[in-house]
Image (cartoon, rainbow, N blue to C red):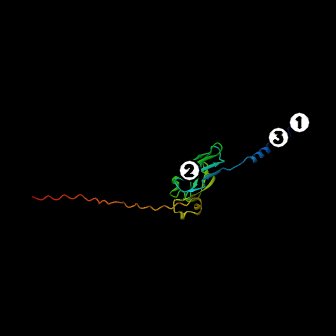
Amino acid sequence: MRKYLLLASLAVVVIAGSLIVFQQVKAQQAPTSAPTLVVTPAYGPLAKNTNLVILGTGYKPAQELNILFYDGFGSIGALEETVKADDKGNFVSSWTLGDYSRGGILVEGVTNIMTADESFNIIATAAVALADTGRDWARWPAWAKGAFPKPKPKEAATPKPAATGTPKPAASPTAAAEPKPKS
């Protein structure tokens, strides 16, 4: 009876050890990825109609996320609307710069777009470069000159051709009535 008890105990230890080793191997094979963030395009004009697509993967399923950015005042700003990851931990969002492109809220250069949890703890970061393409091309930063086409020079307004034919006399005021002779 002792032999059977000893063999049974040994079998339990071997099975338990095998399960632990199997779980460790499986955990090493499973891809572990931190949340990632991609902003496309990676560069664009600092303009009201510029649209950025923000993509994220590796988040918790159904996680509420804040989209943050560095502003021109040295602070972190947040978009008004949050995004929610799907059941696989992915999300896609869109941001048209609108009024953020004016008044120094976003400035020319490279800035970071970030995702943050409900407590505003930053989870992932992606860089985006914005250039003020509305100003004189000579003042564009070097990277923008390589990224965007040089604007065509504005043509000077052409004067209207002179009218042909006999000029019409200017309108004259109506003649005043002659005074009536006094009787």
The residue carrying mark 3 is: 15
Residue 95 is labelled as 2
What secondary structure is found at the residue carrying circle 3? helix
The residue carrying mark 1 is: 4
Where residue 43 appears, as percent x and y from the top left, is 59, 56
Q: Which of the pair 133/125 is nearer the observer?
A: 133
**Residue 24 shown left or right of residue 156 in the figure:** right
Q: Which of the pair 125/46 is nearer the observer?
A: 46
Instruction: Assess disc 2: are there few (<14), some (14-19) or many (≥20) residues with their C-alpha within 10 Å of its C-alpha.
Output: some
Q: Residue at position x 76%, y 45% from top?
A: 26
Q: In which quadrant of the rendered image does the C terminus lie?
A: bottom left
- Considering every residue shown, the one lying at the far bottom of the view is 138
Residue 72 is labelled as none
Answer above or below: position of 154 versus 60.
below
Amino acid identity at mark 3? Ile
Question: How far is mark 2 from mark 3, CA to CA?
Answer: 54 Å
